[in-house]
Image (cartoon, grey):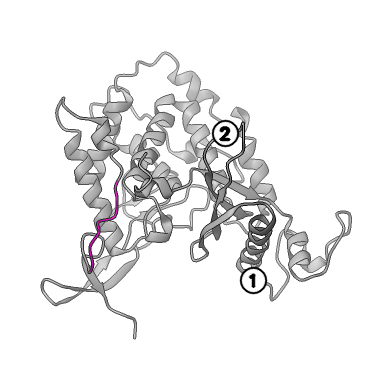
Amino acid sequence: MQGTSFAAAMPEVDIIVSIDQDMLVAWQLGKPRGLDSPAPASEEAGAFPEGVDAKKMQKSAIRSFTDRLVSQGGFKFRRSAFRGQEPKVTLLAPMVSGVFDQPILFDFSVNSTTPLYSAALLAECCRMDVRAHELIILVRRWAKNRGICHVAKGHLSPYAWSVLVVYFLQVAACPDKAEGQLLPALQDVQLSSLLLAPDFAGVSASATDKTKICAEPTLSQSGLTSELEASEGRPETQSVAELMRDLLHFYAHEFQWGEEGVSLRRGSRGPPRTSPPREVWVNESTGRTESVVAGPYIEDPFEPRRNLGECMTAPSLARLQEELARAAELCVGKAASLERLLEPWAPPERSGAGLDEPLQQVQAQ
């Protein structure tokens, strides 16, 4: 990997500190509480006390840990991402003799659930069809190398890309129906009754509870035993390479961005649960003000009210479609090259608007 490429600056490691919410509040408010001390009634059931902003508590804790890691641990600060759904910082771990001969870039967060959801989804898909696991890894590598998985820049997260892969395997992976539906709807699979509960949105359970659920998935919890037995001995008529080719074609030419909604719980194509976010822009070629779709609707299977595509902007969506078209074209014919497909993208050295900035946004009055 070239050090100047965009992909080289994207971490592949997540480190999450899980702190009991009561202790987090007491620590941040300067009121230490012992492990055995009971929480006030207002703080029970995983709820923050009245007047306490949960997101601010999370950010404050991350800053405290970061200060200690940088000042005393030898870590280097790279960037922060506090505007997203889950705040985090990116740090660089120093080289350790005999352990790793290069610095390790990683994301650091407190009580974050997205990496746990991603790991749980990856594990469950692997149990159903190992090709799903391999395809997710390949797509995430491609998105990283091409610079379209950095949320702070308005692109989809690696977790969102995993969801897109699973959705493809549910609705479009086998056009000839030779294998049937590769992956079923998640409401049929039941990853976990708590995580897929309609009212679950991170309020009824603490981050510690979610960590336990995501970190310890079992076949009995997920209800996958019957699925595995049913698929045992089923011929695999498509390779991972063929699935990758079909996935790129599907999202480049068939999927209707802004008109379709991605829902793993539904497991079939259909409209989004709510209207996708839109932005008002001035088209520089015509000078006209236009309302354009800013991003897709990608339902988080573990938190159905959460849209994983809300981080996108009209320029980042345009760039996503451009990369999909490029990749789909590269995969046509027998001369398709994995090396060219995964060629790292580097930001063009130019001033002014370009491919990443095709439109000029109108500032809200």
Q: Tag 2: residue type?
A: Ser
* Label 2 SS: helix
Residue appearing at x 31%, y 49% in the figure:
270
Figure check: 351 above or below 235:
below
Inter-mark Cα distance, 2 to 1: 34 Å
Q: Position of residue 207 (x, y in %)?
A: 66, 52
Q: Tag 1: residue type?
A: Asp
* Label 1 SS: loop
Residue range of the region highlighted in magenta in the rendering? 345-351
Q: Residue furthest left?
A: 286
Q: Is residue 178 magenta?
A: no
Q: Are marks 2 and 1 in contact (CB under 8 Å)?
A: no
Quick one: 26 or 166, which is closer to the camera?
Answer: 26
Q: Position of residue 275 (x, y in %)?
A: 34, 63
Q: Mark 2 against mark 1, which lies toward the viewer?
A: 1
Residue 222: mark in rendering: 2
Q: Position of residue 193 (x, y in %)?
A: 60, 42
Q: Is residue 200 visible?
A: no
Residue appearing at x 18%, y 36% in the figure:
330
Question: Counting other residues with Cα less than 10 Å from the Cα at mark 1, is it few (<14), some (14-19), or many (20 or more)?
Answer: few
Q: Position of residue 208 (x, y in %)?
A: 69, 49
Query: Which comes sooner in the sequence, label 2 or label 1?
Result: 1
Residue appearing at x 47%, y 32% in the figure:
125
Q: Mark 1 — residue?
A: 53
